[in-house]
Image (cartoon, rainbow, N blue to C red):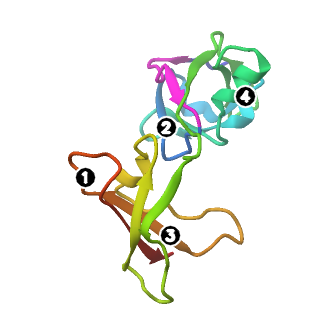
Amino acid sequence: MPIIRITGGIPASIAENSGPADWIANLGLAGDLSRLAGIEITGPMASYFTATWNPTFGFATLRPDARLDFEAFSAAGILPQVEIGLTYVFDDGTRQTEAAPLRLAVLDRDDTAPTGLAFSSGGTVAAGAIGAVIGTLWRWPTRILLARSSSPSRPTTPGASRWWMACSSSATASPWAGTTCRTGRC
C-alpha cells in the first residue's frame, strides 16, 4: 500500500465566518504522490471544509466550505475548536487515514449589527443618483467600522435590494461627525 505523510502544517486558527477566499491552507505532502487520486476530509466538522489535491506542486489545499460561528460553540458549551482528519484515496481504491487530526481554533469576530445609527442630515436617495452624497451618519455611542470601510457593503441575500451604500469618515477630532455616505448600483 502507498504511504503519504504531511510535510507542512496549517494555520493554527480560523476567524469565524471565514469563506473560501478568506482562509486557505496549503498542506505539503510527501511519499507515493504519483498514486494519490484524491483527499477526503473526515470527522464531525468535515462538511465545513473542502480539500483539493494539486499533483503538479505536491500539496493539498484546504478551504472552508461553510462558515463557522464562534457563538454556536459557546452556546453548545464546547471549546471553539475544529478537528478534521484527512484520508488519502489512491488510484487502486486503497485508503490511508492520517493518524493525527488537524486542529484549528475558531476565533471570535465582532459580528454584532451596529445600533444607534441614524442620519443627522440628509438620508434620502434620489432615483438614479449613483455616487451622490445621501447624508451624514450620526453614531452613538461607538465608532462604526462600516463608516471606515474601503469597499461598499453589497446585499447577498436573494431578493435583497440591488443598491449599496458606502460610507467614509473625514472626522479628526470627533468620532461621530463627518461621515459621508454614497450609493451605488450592484
Residue 164 image label: 3
Disc on the earlier residue, 2 or 3: 2
Question: Which residue is at 68% across, 63% downward?
Answer: 157
Disc on the earlier residue, 4 or 2: 2
Mark 1 sits on what residue? 171
Question: Is the residue 185 above or below the residue 144 in the image?
Answer: below
Question: Which residue is at 53% across, 64% downward?
Answer: 154
Magenta span includes 10: yes
Marks 3/4: CA–CA distance = 29 Å
Instruction: For marks 3 and 4, give the one nearer the viewer.
Output: 3
Marks 2/3: CA–CA distance = 25 Å
Question: Disc 2 marks which amino acid?
Answer: Trp
Judged from the image, the secondary structure of the residue bearing numbered disc 3 is strand
Q: Position of residue 29 (x, y in %)?
A: 49, 24
Question: Disc 3 marks which amino acid?
Answer: Trp
Residue 72 image label: 4
Question: Disc 1 marks which amino acid?
Answer: Ala
In the displayed orientation, state which residue is furthest to the top.
99
Question: Which residue is at 72% across, 30% downward?
Answer: 46
Marks 1/4: CA–CA distance = 37 Å
* Circles 1, 4 touching at the beta carbon (< 8 Å): no
Q: Quadrant of the N terminus?
A: top right
Question: Is the residue 8 above or below the residue 133 in the image?
Answer: above
Q: Badge 3: how crowded within 10 Å, few (<14), some, or many (20+)?
A: some
Judged from the image, the secondary structure of the residue bearing numbered disc 4 is helix
